[in-house]
Amino acid sequence: MDGAELARITGSSGRTLAPSSRVPADRRAATQADESGTFALQSIRNGRFTATEKNYAAPNTGVLRARSAAVTGAWEGFAFEWHEATGTYALKSLANNRYVAVEGNYTGNSQNVLRARSTAAGTWERFTLYYNEDLDRWALQSALNGRFVAMENSYTGSLQYALRARSAEVTGSWEQFALFEIGS
């Protein structure tokens, strides 16, 4: 996808935020939502839902991984909170009630990994959402480093399927997600 295929999503009233899982696929793009809501994030690359690994040992406590076959509870849920001043969203994990941050100071395979670890939302925890209506897919861009979030399908070990803000552009299914409303 290039920039012409992506539409930036804002919290303005009447704009589409996310497709509802209760609406047929051919009608999802027209579904209206609030500026904020509770959603599950599904990787297009592996078809798995993103979960917060709240029981991982430090320094990976709260890492986000696309590893769940279904949405079974708070592990896969995120509150999307609109911030008018910056025109961005903060994602708050329902599993541990923490905001998702991009770990810009980490190195190696953990650099720019997404972790639900913050008690407040600043630049590290802000994302711009982009929507491709033709494909009914979403992309998230980090406000911290300007990179798109990708799912690390080829990683192994505890960071397999981890989400990381590392792509300069949306080049394929690694950077594409489906959003499903899970709460009202």
Image (cartoon, rainbow, N blue to C red):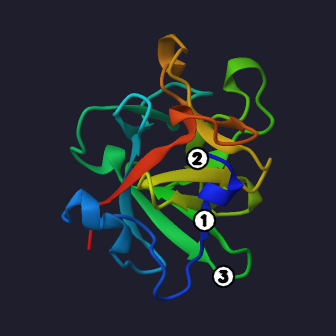
The mark found on residue 117 in the picture is 2
Tell me the residue at 52%/54% (across/down): 98
Distance between the Cα atoms at labels 3 and 1? 18 Å
Question: In the rendered image of this protein, does residue 170 appear above or below residue 179?
Answer: above
User: Residue 8: image x %, image y %?
Assistant: 63, 67
Residue 84 is tagged as 3
Task: Say which quadrant the C terminus sits in.
Answer: bottom left
Q: Amino acid at mark 3?
A: Glu
Which amino acid type is shown beneath numbered disc 2?
Arg
Q: Quadrant of the N terminus?
A: top right
**Mark 3 or 2 closer to N-term?**
3
What's the mark number on residue 7? 1
> Mark 2 and mark 1 in contact (Cβ < 8 Å)?
no
Left-right relation of 78 to 31: right
Could you say which disc has been placed on residue 184 in the image?
Answer: none
* Snapshot quadrant of residue 87: bottom right
Question: What distance separates the C-alpha of mark 3 from that of mark 2?
Answer: 23 Å
Local SS, label 1: strand
Q: What secondary structure is marked by label 3?
A: loop
Asked if residue 32 can be seen in this view, the reply is: yes
- In the picture, measured across the screen, residue 135 lies left or right of residue 108, that is left
